[in-house]
Image (cartoon, rainbow, N blue to C red):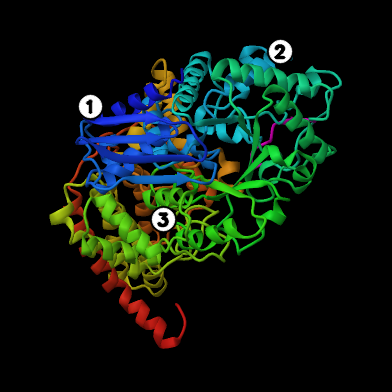
Amino acid sequence: MSPFPAAAEAAIRRVLGNGAATVDVSIEESSPDFFEVSARDGRTVIRASSPALSLAGLRACLATTGDQFDEILTGARGAVPHPPAQPLRRVFTLPHRFYGNDTEDAYVGPYRDFAAWEDLIDGIAARGYTELFVPVGTESAYVDLLTAYGYSREEALAWIPLPSHQPWWLLQNMSGYPSGMNERLLAQRTTLGRRIVERLQELGMRAVLPGYGGTVPRDFGERNSGAHVTVPSGDWQGFDRPGWLDPSDPMFPALAATFYASSARHLGAVTMYKTDLLHEGGQPGDIDVSAAGVAVQRAMLAAAPESTWVMLGWQHNPPREVLAAVERDRVLVVDGLSDRYEDTDREEEFLGTDYAFGGIWNFGGDTAMGAQASTWTQRFTRWRDRPGSHLRGVAAMPEGGFNNPLAMDLLAELSWRADAVQLEPWVTEWVRQRYGRPHAAAEQAWRRIVRTAYSLPDDNGFSEPHDSLFAAWPSFTVGTSSSFSPAQDTYDLPAFAAALPVLLAAAEELSAHRAYRFDLADVARQAVTNTARQLLPVLAEAAATGELARYDHATDLWLSAMDLLDRIAGTQQLWLLGRLLDEARAAGEDEAESDRLERSQRLILTSWGPERAATQGQLSDYAGRDAQGLVGTLYRSRWSAFLAAARPGSGAAPLTEAEWWARDQSWVDSVDRHGIHSTAEGDIIALADEAVVLLACVQDATRMISAAAGEDGKDR
């Protein structure tokens, strides 16, 4: 008997609590996937092809009746759904709805527990995503592999990074930093990974586990005579890459078999594995890349004959020579560049390989609102419907999870809509469902937001909006906190800011909705963050001309904006640094280990690595974000010191990048929690009102420099 009906009932109970007693759910396995919601005798009836899609049916039902799935999921259980007036039916014609990014586990919460993963799984299932990348627990397969080939457990664990940095080890970029694992943490991660895979399979979803591409320690060839091991030349962002055992080496099939057998034993048997060869610039040396690809796939299929090799479409990946050599009907490319560059022919680029149309919109877990939503709606249907198309799904691949609900929902909707999505009408309906009712002010505000932050240029080489200058190492010329984000404004800042008072006007009617309060906080947070880009030219001009009064006024506005930003971020549990630090400390066995894990969490969010990686490798503040505690402690202390030193007449010399890095280390090494909250607090309605006042003051401060720029026809 199929376990799916019981799993579906359990999923509904998990979300609704006692309210599940009013819902009847049945599972009818079929292809294509579907769900249907109707009413019978005053009860809500959900039919679906899997338990996961029964949650999607529940979410669709709640959205039409004024309740919010996400509010219930993150708040008090017990809501009773109202049966829909008319049956709802949705058919998913595309087989792949993939969620996950190689780096998300590090940036969202490397020390989160199963309850957090459970909410993530339910949340993506409710949007129709049915494939999830799960890196957690693969450490055990590597320990088993290495101990079978001459390494002690202690040596194997020392080679594997802490969870905060493991994604880049799995990507063959680095190893052993900031320190190795221990047996207790390994056991925790293995148990957690197993529970995640089991939950996905209960729901009829597919876990995508890391596959084996030949990554080994650099000294593997010395310990295993005759093994053909190369070190992919060129470091990765200042880190030494691990070794690569040539997959064509006679030893490789046995290593791969050990890896896959261990993965199945510890985590469970799956049919999708993800691995990428030569990620982000690795050079193969004397290894034949085509032959390597064939050998990697052959080993994967030997271990799991029904498996699909998932490859990331990113930079020069997948290598064209690999696609040309392998069985392409057993490959899926999750394309992370569908929206980043000008329109291209993916069928030609991927040699007719099936692919999922994907987006990555918040690198490093950046909190910046925005995405290439307008590009998605314009390209997706055209790519899907052209002759010979191999577009077979969607891939949501944020590096920072659920901090951008509009992007998550829109990309998911593309997977079942037969017609092209018209963005503004879609957003109007999305707002009505999100807040449970039509509201003219809220709809108007979101149309302004969509015309700015969600209509980014598709020809600037980026798929994300500009980031926060508050998170940057200070200077008067800085254009981005991360070296890999746009250095220029990606939309009209005053036009975006104008949405805030309009959205705030809806508070009287909508303030009871958790989704509205989150969105108001998000828009207020982004509008305040954007003021840094408006104030920095004012500060630079005043410093250059020696206008002390103007410099001091702009400095006061700058620091006031940072203080307000910290308080706004503090209203949302999602944006609390304290929550992440608590998770890290809870994973430790004793105080010393808790200190070590907290340090790794602070590290990944700030300087990321040692000085070489942070400066020469440009990783510092890649994961910069508007998090309460991060803004109010580290970022504010940087800018306060810089603005005081740069004040006309101070005579202080500016700090170098190396000096900023050294300064940050005292914060990274600290366990001081002063000013860092673990529980959300504050009235977002009142704080949004403060933000509107601040925006007006910033506009006044920038008006003079704008007028001067207009007089001489150029920016000063």
Mark 1 / mark 3, whichever is N-terminal: 1
Read off the magenta span.
Answer: 236-246
Residue visible at 19% across and 36% down?
Answer: 42
For residue 74, above or below residue 370: above
Which amino acid type is marked by label 2?
Ala
Q: Which residue is mark 1?
A: 21
Q: Is residue 331 left or right of residue 403?
A: right
Q: Residues within 10 Å of mark 1 (few under 14, many from 20)?
A: some
Q: Secondary structure at mark 3?
A: loop
Query: Is 242 contained in the magenta span?
Result: yes
Which amino acid type is marked by label 1?
Ala
In which image quadrant can residue 108 be found? top left
Q: Is residue 231 left or right of residue 94?
A: right
The picture places residue 589, in percent across and down from the top left corner, at 41, 15
Which amino acid type is marked by label 3?
Ser
The picture places residue 186, in percent across and down from the top left corner, at 52, 18
Q: Which residue is mark 2?
A: 148
Q: Main secondary structure of the magenta part?
A: loop
The picture places residue 121, in percent across and down from the top left corner, at 42, 33
Q: Secondary structure at mark 1?
A: helix
Label drawn at residue 468: 3
Which circle, 1 or 3, is nearer the viewer? 1
Question: Label 3, label 2: how many angstroms apart (C-alpha)?
Answer: 47 Å
Q: Residues within 10 Å of mark 2 (few under 14, many from 20)?
A: few
Which circle, 1 or 2, is nearer the viewer? 1
